[in-house]
Amino acid sequence: MRGRRVARALPAAALLAAAAAALLAPPSAAAPTLEQYRYFRALSLDLLGRLPTRAELADFEAPGFDLDAWIERHLDGPGYVDRLTRIYMDALRLELGPAVYFAPRATTLHRIEVLGPDGEPLHVYYRQNQRRLLPVIDGEFCFSPLESGLRVANGALPTGTRIPISQRLLDERTTLVRPYWLYRDYLSVSPTQRYGAGWKDPDSAYRPIRALLFEPDGKTPTVAIRICKEEAQTADVGHLWASDIPPLPRGAPLPPGRIRPPMPDDPYAKAHRGEPISCRSALAPWMSVDCGCGIGLVRCMPGENWWRDPRAFLLPAHVPLGVEDPIGLVTTTSSGWHKFWWAQEAIHYMKHVFGADRDFREMLTGRYTFINGPLAQFYQSSAPGACCAQHTAFGMRDDEAPLFSPSAVPPVVFPHDVSDWTFIPDRGPRAAGLITMPVFLTKYASRRARAAALYDAFLCKGFSAEHAELPPSDEVDLMVRPGCASCHATLEPLAAYFSRVEETTWTYLPAEKFPIENPFCKLNAQGKARLVCQPFYDPAFSDQERGVLRGAYASEDHTERGPVGAAADLTRRREFASCAVRRVTEALLGRPVGDGDEALLRSLRERFVSRGYRMRALVGAIVRSPAYARGGSARGAGERGGGAR
């Protein structure tokens, strides 16, 4: 750190080289200075993720300590990887709060407590809106109020006074299943490896809640669950079915035993009855009677109550119980279980990019990923189960072109393999790094939100129009509307990359079923579009000849190229590398960069690009820079902050 006044007169490159040489020079026999201690502390925080230990300080104080080699050795350690991962998790804000909900009716089981033939309580699992051959219970719980004494409405507390269900009805309507959440060997004909008993080595992170493990008395271990027979079916493919029961006339009394009118037949099911349908589709429960939850109920999530989003598993709490205590566990719902693992997928993906020193552009372009058991179950069952309730009018009844192909999931990954992560080399041709992962697509639910997130996180640009006036206007094109054009001229073409990824979810809308211009969705004489078209086609840009796919008006090219095109185009822009350099530099310096840092940023960007967009080279140069050393000297450990905005 000596000789700073002389160094200022040197060119930028020479200044950096001279400063680095001074910083990394082995200490003499004299004790390190306070500046050097602070610098080493800052390095430890950023590269180790903690303060240095006494032993590490002793090594640092020893004559001849090679600080440059120490830095190089820790540029591939877990502390360094965690630091960079936090920077980009913060930049993308990939945390999903309670407002994000995912518990599809097609894949969520609910549990009702009824009375058995002996008058003792027992649990029965069922699925909401499940079609059944018997009209009195079609679309409802598999016992009518007359049979169970309970009125079971979707998402509401069962009401009534329970009465014993006869053994004949119990055998006729339900069956016993040994489900995957209780048995490691659920694929066996007769599973025996029960959680907590024959299952000798359960993953310590896989914790079903206690209510799923015991009978209603809270003492007797559950050996097999009782579930309505339709939900217990194991076929992969079912058939479209319609009951042909006419709609109930207005004002007519309900048929005996029903709590709501008969389940209406879907027009598509009536027109295509008998045709095959994937039992993984959202349509399967309410358009077929021969689709269930698969072998061991693996296609469904368990729930211990009747709530819309029932509780199922335990997850680590965010707050430690104490200095010497482990992290506590909290009960989570089936929706919370999904969301937690979506975020973990993004974290594992980033850690691979940084830990293996991959090309940073793969954050957006990579087709690979990592999954564990819950994610394998999600991609094979729950993700397809989010499609396709509104798509049948366009001839689409399952997820035909998924962003993650279910066939990419190895058959040996089980739902309870929580801690083991499997590398998936290729998710499919539409995969594009983080931006086609569920955590990103649900965090940023609209096309514009997704585009703005990319613009901010990877180009370091935002959308804000200061002092803009918004005069009254009938112009529907925001790219030219006065007061809006300053932002939307850029935002709308970026948003068009996501026109084929359905908002709020990850369903891809293939061009064969959803052309950009679709005569089926043209406006009528009153200027209105068909009701089935409105979620997908924008009346503001449609006319009486054709409907226009939402968001596609801004760029048909971007629409057809999709997220893969967005990744390719963004990573080619000069601002992509500049933003990465700026964001990581600000995070490690703990402050925004300014005019005085221009030479440093230019040098860092040149190094970053010339080394193939590798972060290890960039971070190595940052922590060896005089700006970083001065930051370590000027601030306390608690002031070294997270990612910059």
Image (cartoon, grey):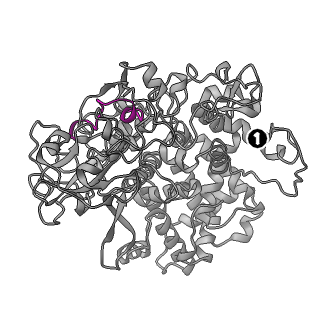
Element type at mark 1: helix
Which percent across, then down, holds residue 306?
Answer: 34, 56
Q: Position of residue 385 (x, y in %)?
A: 41, 37
Residue at (87% x, 51% y) in the render: 470
Look at the image and say whether residue 27 sits in the magenta stretch: no
Screen quadrant of the N terminus: bottom right
Q: Percent from the top left, x then y, of residue 519?
A: 67, 19
Residue 496 vs residue 165: left or right?
right
Left or right, 2 with reference to 422: right
Q: Is residue 291 magenta?
A: yes
Q: Is residue 46 visible?
A: yes
In terms of image quadrants, where is residue 120? bottom left
Q: Which residue bears the numbered disc 1?
A: 490
Image coordinates of residue 402 in percent, x first then y, are: 46, 31
Q: Is residue 604 above or below residue 636?
A: above
Q: Principal SS element in the magenta part? A: loop
Q: How many marks?
A: 1
Q: Between residues 361 and 245, which one lies in front from this camera angle?
A: 245
Q: Is residue 217 above or below residue 492?
A: below
Near-viewer residue (591 or 123): 123
